[in-house]
Amino acid sequence: MRITLVFILTLVLPSVLLSAFALQAVEAERVARLADRARSQEVEVQGVVHEVDELLQGRARAATDALRAARARTPAEAAGVAARLVATEPLFGGFVVLDAAGRRAVPTGPLAPPSWPTTGVAVALGGCAGAALCPDPLPLLLAAEERSTRDREGSLEMLASVIRRGSPEATAAALFDTGRIHEAGALLDTAPGATPLVGGMHNAREAYEALSALPLRRIDARARPVALQARFRHAMILATLKRTEQARAQLVALLDGLEAEGDLLPRDAVVELAERTGALLEDGAALARARDIAQRRERVEQAAARIEDLFGTSMRGALRDAAVARRGRAPGGVPGLLAAAGDAPAPASASGGAAAPAPVLFKARAGDRFEIVVCAPVTREGGGVAGLVALQLDLGALEAALRSRVLARGPTHSLVPVSEQPEARLDLAVAPLRPPLDHVAALYRAPPDTTPAPLGLARGTMTVWGVGLSIAGIIAGVLVTISTVRRETKAAQLKSDFVANVTHELKTPLTSIRMFLDTLLLGRVNDEAETKECLQVMARESERLTRLIEQLLVFSRIESRRWRLRLNFEHPRTMVDDALKVLADQLGVASKEELGIEVVAVQELTLVAADRFAMVEAILNILHNAWKYTPEPRRIRVVLASRRRHIEIAVEDNGIGVPRGDRRRIFVKFERGSNAEEKRIQGSGVGLSLALSILEAHRGTITYTPLEPTGSRFSLWIRK
Ligand code: ADP
């Protein structure tokens, strides 16, 4: 019980505590590292989120700023800037422009038909009076044309007066608008006197020529690209007149114009005229160019339709809110649009410090994809919103740009759709991008942790080793304790056996001395001879007693290491003889010869350095055992031989021998052979270990060899 307690207190408890501390330390270190890693992973991922946001906001702001810097005051002007942005900035996929009323203005949006209150009167008046009243020549021209069938003279006069009063462009546009320029030209050419009319325009060719001079983007009241169509028809007439070179130059100029401004013109006209022009030019390059123009225009149209489809409601809402805000009421759900429109505090450049308003971004889902537009207002000259430009961000291009930027940070960084983000793991950090890109998440995958753990071991290995060592420590502790306990128990047992044996050994001679003393004292002896015999026994027994005590004293001296060898050159034979003499004494035999122990010397022996007293003691012990463990008829002999480095003193007997299992054990202090115990032969288990200690002090040893059929040979090896 006490041992168990000691064991627990001295070994198990400290081991367990140490292991617990060690594991806790390892765990604490692991947790600290993990926390560090998580922090740095978070920093990495937020870095990406920030960078992406900067990029998107930067591009959106650049677009808004470009519109503001271009000072686009009308939807048409703003559309020109937007078209240029789309053509030059790969991140923008398309655009659409709304007017203040929320109608699609450009591309292809219809212009508001001018309403002239005086038109009806002008038409009714006709002639110069009518032309003076009505700045739009179209109704008058239509009226003149209509009159031509029944009143040719009146019709011509009306036509001439309209042409004289109006600007050449307006008139030409009006002529074109009637769709009958040829007829009108012919009408004019066949007029009496055929006087050249305004600007020398007196036939269809000249009418088209005048129209061709108009800006290409000019659209008539029915949203037809007047100048564009006139240029084409002019080229056609030139071709008809066989002025091929001029016709060709006109067509090439037409392609140039389409390339520059086609995106802002009505789609059908652009596509049709581009294709026809390409075909007329009859060369591969022109054809390809024309096809490109047509395709691009188609794309612009599709993008515009898509934007309007997805964002029409939001954009119109933004316009409404801007209008409401202008009237002094709070703006609705589109913060920033008015600020961006310039109604709010002056922009950064003007105020020299105030931050530019954040760009307005709208996001919508289209099937499994998202679309994003950047909205910028079109501001009127005196302030106020004239319309709204929406630029579509090409999300594919944007994501590709983002990915290449993010991937440039290393293979650890990537972008994934939010819906596909992986399960949370320790080596992963994920964060959604900021709106409107919040459907995408930035992902950082930490590289494997290669930082060496303390002791240069990998962390996992260290934990395994820590646990393993602790367990091994506990097991070793348990084993050591068990073996110590067993050894101590055994020692205690041996000591108590020894005490019992020694006591017995001491008591036996004392008892016989006492017995003979009593005999003498009580006068029970009859004669001198008996008295002498008694005294002799007593002397022998006291001699035996002395011997035993001496033996114990020698042993304890050797044991206590206070003993020092007194070496002299001794002859082995002499030492054997001395031992035999002592043995004879101990056994009460008159002389050593009577013991009947034969001493054989195989060769001439040399002297050896030995402590004579100790060595005789050792030999005596062996001889005594041989005598003790050999029943009659006893045959004991001592063989002396000179070996290579040793002198061998072998004591051979035909006794009971030592059982195989005891042959090592018998040399251990207090150990006795099972044979000795069985046969109840008295002894203390000290003799052999004492002899071995003496021989070892002489740098020699003792060996045991069993003899056939029975008996033992104990050899004492003394260093030469
Ligand atoms: P003990 O006092 O028991 O003789 P020793 O140390 O002298 O103690 O001997 C140890 C054991 O060796 C003995 O108990 C005995 O079993 C065995 N032994 C020693 N010498 C002999 C021998 N000559 N023949 C048989 N057994 C022997």
Image: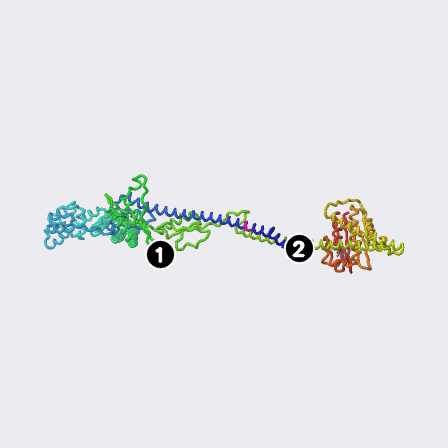
Which residues make up the magenta segment? Answer: 18-22
Q: In which quarter of the image is ligand 1?
A: bottom right
**Residue 412, visible in the rendered structure:** yes
| Disc 1 C-beta below 8 A from ligand 1 | no
Magenta part, dominant SS? helix
Distance Cα–Cα, label 1 vs label 2: 79 Å
- The mark nearer the N terminus, 1 or 2, is 1
Pick whichever, 372 or 106, lies toward us: 372
Q: Name the residue under label 2.
A: 486
Please provide percent x and percent y for residue 104: 25, 52
Residue 523 x, y percent position in the rendering: 86, 55
Q: Classify 10 Å Cα crowding around label 2: few (below 14), some (14-19), many (20 and above).
A: few
Where residue 167 appears, x then y in whole percent? 17, 45
Give the total of numbered labels.
2
Say which amino acid is labelled 2: Arg
Is residue 20 covered in magenta?
yes
453 in the magenta segment:
no
Rendered position, 413 above or below 353: below
Viewed as shown, does residue 523 lie left or right of 429? right
Assign a secondary structure to mark 2: helix
**Residue that label 1 marks:** 368
Q: Is residue 199 left or right of residue 654?
A: left
Q: Which amino acid does label 1 sit on?
A: Asp
